[in-house]
Image (cartoon, rainbow, N blue to C red):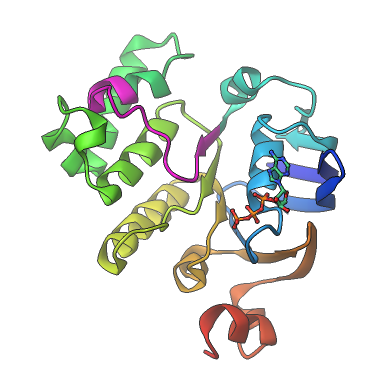
Amino acid sequence: MLHLDKVSVRYGPVRAVLDLELAVGQGELIALLGPNGAGKSSTIGAINGLVPATGTITLGGEDISRLSVEERIARGIAVAPEGRRIFVNLTVAENLRLGAALRRDKAGVRADTERYLTLFPVLAERIGQPAGTLSGGEQQMLAIARAMMSRPRVLLLDEPSLGLAPLIVTRIFDLIGQLKSEGLTVILVEQNAAQAMRFADQVCVLASGRISYRGTPRDLAGTDVMKLYLGGA
Ligand SMILES: Nc1ncnc2c1ncn2[C@@H]1O[C@H](COP(=O)(O)OP(=O)(O)OP(=O)(O)O)[C@@H](O)[C@H]1O
């Protein structure tokens, strides 16, 4: 579904991502782990087009490397960014509508709105409230629902657990697991390795812009990577 070939990101003299190779199949979830500054967010930015990158990115066989952010959204790439970045002064309903801004199928947008309000009932209860009045967990749910409103084939999730209580994190990962079970392809940047492993088909550890480890969650059991990220589990 999504393939990265020799993708690199530079910020002036800083080499944030170096010749990254990544392949994710339809309905797969790949977890990107790694310390602060490893290049995880830059990788997400390279895929959605917000960060200039070299190399080749293909989606369903089509080269999207030179397309704009909007063109990539139209082809099925959506991001729920780190820090959520919802529009705090707009209502929940308005945020959801913006997620579907590039869609012309009004009936489909209505049906998807219903669907995500059913999947995230707390958003239905707060549909007319400014998004800034939602709790952190609710804002994260809104960020995911807003991203899903563009009907993505690939959802990029940047640290969905950041700053949230464990119970809320579990709830959010349950929802991510459900979307994956419906065929969504997910690239997940996450510090909470235990949660990321629940649904991951592949785990990649980035260090200084390169992949230092790649394997299935089962391969990871008992390795140093596991000790580093799961405190010796
Ligand atoms: N806009 C920018 N200008 C210059 N350097 C940047 C910029 N954005 C990121 N960097 C640098 O690129 C490297 C990778 O950053 P990136 O945010 O991709 O890492 P990360 O793995 O997502 O880290 P974190 O877990 O802290 O979010 C870091 O050294 C960072 O300082």
Residue, x 79% and y 23% (percent of image)? Answer: 66
The range drawn in magenta is 78-95
Identity of the residue drawn at 27% across and 22% down: 90
Q: Is residue 114 left or right of residue 30?
A: left
Q: Residue 11, relative to residue 215: is it above or below? A: above
Q: Residue 161: where, in percent of width, then height? A: 41, 58
* Magenta segment includes 45: no
Who's the residue at 52% across and 37% down the image?
79
Which is more toward the observer, 15 or 153? 15
Q: Does 176 sit above or below residue 143?
A: below
Q: Quadrant of residue 215?
A: bottom right
Question: Quadrant where the N terminus lies?
Answer: top right
The x and y percentages for residue 86 are 37, 32
Quarter of the view holding residue 10: top right
Residue farthest to the front, as pictured: 13
Horizontal and vertical percent for residue 194?
47, 74
Is 93 positioned to the left or the right of 154 in the image? left
Quick check: is 81 in the magenta stretch?
Answer: yes
Q: Is residue 205 left or right of residue 96?
A: right
Q: Main secondary structure of the magenta part?
A: loop
- Image coords of residue 197 (percent x, y): 51, 70
